[in-house]
Image: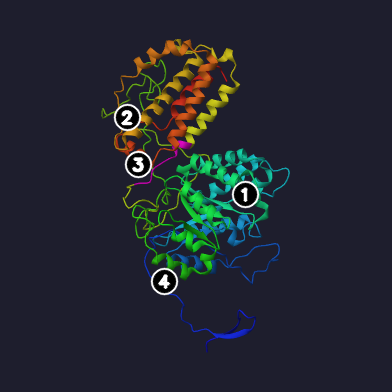
Amino acid sequence: MAPTLRLPRADGTLASYTLSGRPAITPPTGPITSRIGMAAVHVVADPLAAINPTLEVALDWDATLRYRHYVWSLGLAVAEAMDTSQRGMGFDWPTARELIRRSVAEARTVRGAILASGAGTDQLEPGSSVTLADVEAAYEEQCGFIEGVGGRIILMASRALAACARGPEDYEKVYARILTQVRAPVIIHWLGDMFDPALAGYWGSRDLDRATETLLAIVHEHAARIDGVKISLLDQQREIAMRARFPEGVRMYTGDDFDYPTTIRGDGRRASDALLGIFDVIAPAASAALHALPPRLRRADALLQGGRRVRRVSQRPPVSLPHGGRARERALGRAPERAARVDGPRRAAARSRSGRRTDARRPHCGRRRLAFTSLTIRGSRGRITSSKEVPMPVDRSYVAQNTAQRDRLRNFVSRASDQELATPMPSGWTVAAVLGHLAFWDQRIVVLLDTWQRAGATAVPSSESYDDVDWINDAGKPMLLALAPRAAAQLAVACAETADGRLAGLKDEFLTANVAAGGPVNVLRATHRKEHLDEIERALKR
């Protein structure tokens, strides 16, 4: 016999309702191609666990993971370990970590499954002793774990950051540090104080207009590292206005529990995707509605399902792609017989026993400090992208390596004395002139990028021969030596910052074309800097 429930009416009376056993909505089968619909899913507690439920956490893992499979079966994506699972409200980081590990493993068994997990700082207790460095370390720990097990990141708002930040510049610093290290683009979550009062004044101001400008500045600065932004402000007009100002390719994920139908439907020009807790509750209806929507625009990207790629967000482990390291930026004044180096002006070709050149290979980047990786999904190419197929995910690990050596360069210049900068180096160079040499080759990359980006991705600059570099360095040496040592050192830092900023924002199509052409543009600036900084430190006996 079907169960009967007593349900309230609008007038306050109760009425009997007998369950029919038939679903009210049966969503269509197949992939959802109109929008990305992410359900911020709940967890199922283990009611029989022998714990103190006010102090400890115990999940029914089978029921929790079974529900994720159900959501995936409807064509929806899963947002894991978010505030809807009570993160920061009793659901602690160790339990969230285990949940993420298990969910990523489950996603690999489902064709086309999309999963992203919340990375925050909830292992920190906000207080007067917490510093920005503590917040950065906490974010790095969680981001490193998520990408380490093969997951995508949703960068959650941080109570600890809200408590210790003194203004917008602190948010810019923390988010820049994290975004420059991630392997794949992330979703940034702005959770308003109507959901969590501890997040009041996020982005450095209680004035929402000012806070919006800070977030937009971060998005524009790091667009290549951001898949989208989730806004949970219950402010439809603000969401629409921000959406219109996002860089091309950055998505708006609505978190508006009141007005999400209209923001998802769009205004004919732009539409929001969704990352909503309510999709957990109404998953069949949400799936049916998204199936019924037409694609947002003809030029818009389709969700990866059934082998389509998910744009800008890698979901397979990074492959070793050549970075286009130029053999012709060889070490200054080295004898021709010196073993092969990647960057620096005098490298002889090492040859294998077969007589083939062995120095033509570009270096594969080593592991980054946070050992971030990306999610493998069986049967899926895993990116949300245009309908044009991209053969392999683009490797951007050069960004972190460039940043590390640029920071090393900046630190050296800031502490080096004028006397040290004037220290002689081999072949008539000085420390300052070598730094000027670094500036020249970084600036060369900037000039190449200007020309290349005006001409289009397919117009990859041609490679010069390996023999055309020594005279360039020798001709430039008198001018570099004529520079004031401090000016040359500061120029090296400025050019490194400019080059790295341009390279970090280079679109995937340019990187792919560069690799296909054999890497004539050296995007991995770190190797050249490291070699000369090592030489400088040996000369100064540091």
Q: Which residue, given by chain and number where applicable, does mark 3 sit on?
A: 509
Query: In the rendered structure, which disc, 3 or 4, sits on the residue that comes first in sequence?
Result: 4
Disc 1 and disc 4: Cα gap in Å? 36 Å
Name the disc covering residue 158, or none. 1
Q: Which residue, given by chain and number where applicable, does mark 2 sit on?
A: 358
Residue 238: where, in percent of width, then height?
A: 54, 52
- Is disc 2 in contact with disc 1, using a CB cutoff of under 8 Å? no
Question: How busy is the neighbourhood of tag 2: few (under 14 within 10 Å), some, or many (20 plus)?
Answer: some
- Say if the magenta span includes residue 398: yes
In the displayed structure image, the side of residue 503 where residue 212 appears, left or right: right
Residue 33: where, in percent of width, then height?
A: 38, 60
Disc 2 and disc 4: Cα gap in Å? 57 Å
Q: Is residue 6 above or below residue 485?
A: below
Name the disc covering residue 27, or none. 4
Q: Secondary structure at mark 3?
A: helix
Disc 3 and disc 1: Cα gap in Å? 34 Å
Query: In the rendered structure, which disc, 2 or 4, sits on the residue that comes first in sequence?
Result: 4
Q: Residue at x 59, y 23 (%)?
A: 414
Q: Secondary structure at mark 4?
A: loop
Q: Main secondary structure of the magenta part?
A: loop
Task: Write down the region rendered in magenta.
Answer: 392-399
Q: Residue at x 58, y 38 (%)?
A: 173
- Is disc 3 in contact with disc 1, using a CB cutoff of under 8 Å? no
Disc 3 and disc 4: Cα gap in Å? 36 Å
Residue 422 placement: quadrant: top right
Q: For the residue marked with disc 1, what is the amino acid?
A: Ser
Question: How busy is the neighbourhood of tag 4: few (under 14 within 10 Å), some, or many (20 plus)?
Answer: some
Q: For the residue marked with disc 2, what is the amino acid?
A: Thr
- Is disc 2 in contact with disc 3, using a CB cutoff of under 8 Å? no
